[in-house]
Image: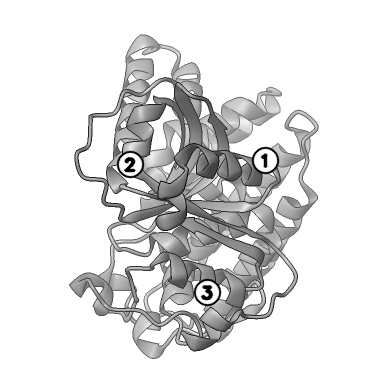
Amino acid sequence: MFEITDMIKLAQQYLNDALPKAALALIFGNRRHTLAALDPTDVETSQFIDLLLDIDSVEDKKTSPPRQSAWKLIKAYNNNPGVSKFAGISPAKFAFQLALRVREPNLISQGEIGVCGANAAVIHFAKADPVGYVRLGLDLMLTGRGRFGKKEVAPGETIMAGVTKLNLAVADYVILTSVRGSASFVEGVLSSRKASQVGVAEAMTERDVSKMLRLAGYTEVEDHVHSNTYLNLKENLNIASLRVGQGYLVMFSINSNLAVEMIQDKKWQTASALKQYPTLPMIAAGVARESGRGTLNLPKRWMANTNHWVLVSKLQVSAQEVTIKLYSWGHSIKRTIPYDRFVEYYDGFISAKLGGEEKLGWEEKMA
């Protein structure tokens, strides 16, 4: 079995050979499918964080001070984690997974539970404010309370004791179930037996998502779902593209099969690359890590029911096609899709701006 020490040594060798991209390709491409199962010691986690710090400091002069600060916070926690407030979670494993997500927030995944609204918001939070994301996770582990933006997250005892009941990476379990299941956030209906085992509310409507974002301190929250969508779909998508370009959080309401088809196409592209470069594993791994591009012809849908929220970071719209990069189920995928097919899977978007405070409107006060 390929252990974390082997991964660290090989990645360090690539780094010593001035190949930081190869080191990243090894970790997040070639070994990506093994990351959730790794159970490092505190020493291994510390070594891995040092490796990420070193890679970040030399990678094409793109050193990220926020990422560096976030990793240093994780390393300090790993050196003195205290007693975890979440039963059954190894602090070293949690720190390791949190460090991975600082580098690649697209690893954040809801798994098989329906917390996609919280999932999309947390990915955006991790991308925009890695230090805030890390502090949320560490505070939850240390005290059982943390801050998601402006709002305190305080999961109940059932959530803090329920990690073995849901098949999630521990870093995602702590943060996603705390954000979605916290009594101080949106109340919801328990629509899944799996989720109800740990008190995680599901089925977030566009009103729920808007309220969650406002409570967290997001501003300029706009709801362009349902009726706003059907009036002028092209205008709706053009506004979404504008908000993406402005750096706003943009969450699409889609039929989940859109994300499923995109992920399957990415996996097919990855498998093809591995076959094409069987003796050049780093080239194959690099392709695997970047295999989020291409054209996708979706199957035709006759029913346009939507049931999934995804974060969107890139969007281009023309009369013929839609090029979109979205985040879902531990993947970031970019594909170009025929316009007429795409809109069969689409039901509008919510956008918001990170930071500041916004007073609740009358509709939220009445909720």
Q: Which badge, 1 or 3, is on the more N-terminal residue?
A: 3
- Classify 99 as above or below 261: below
Q: Would residue 42 be visible to someone looking at this image? A: yes
Q: Which badge, 1 or 2, is on the more N-terminal residue?
A: 1
**Toward which corner of the image does residue 358 lie, by quadrant?**
bottom right
Pick the residue in front: 65 or 217. 217
Circle 1 residue: 245
Dividing the image into 4 quarters, which one contains the N terminus? top left
Q: Would residue 1 be visible to someone looking at this image? A: no
- Classify 143 as above or below 235: below
Callout 2 secondary element: helix
Marks 2 and 3 sit apart, C-alpha to C-alpha, by: 24 Å
Q: Residues within 10 Å of mark 3 (few under 14, many from 20)?
A: many
Residue 24 percent coordinates (x, y): 58, 34
Residue 5 percent coordinates (x, y): 49, 44
Callout 1 secondary element: helix
Report the side of 246 relative to 304 (left or right): right
Circle 2 residue: 345
Say which residue appears at 45% left-offset and 41% top-offset.
233
Q: Which badge, 2 or 3, is on the more N-terminal residue?
A: 3
Dots 1, 2 in contact, CB < 8 A: no
Pick the residue in front: 83 or 193. 193
Circle 3 residue: 211
Report the side of 339 relative to 83 (left or right): left
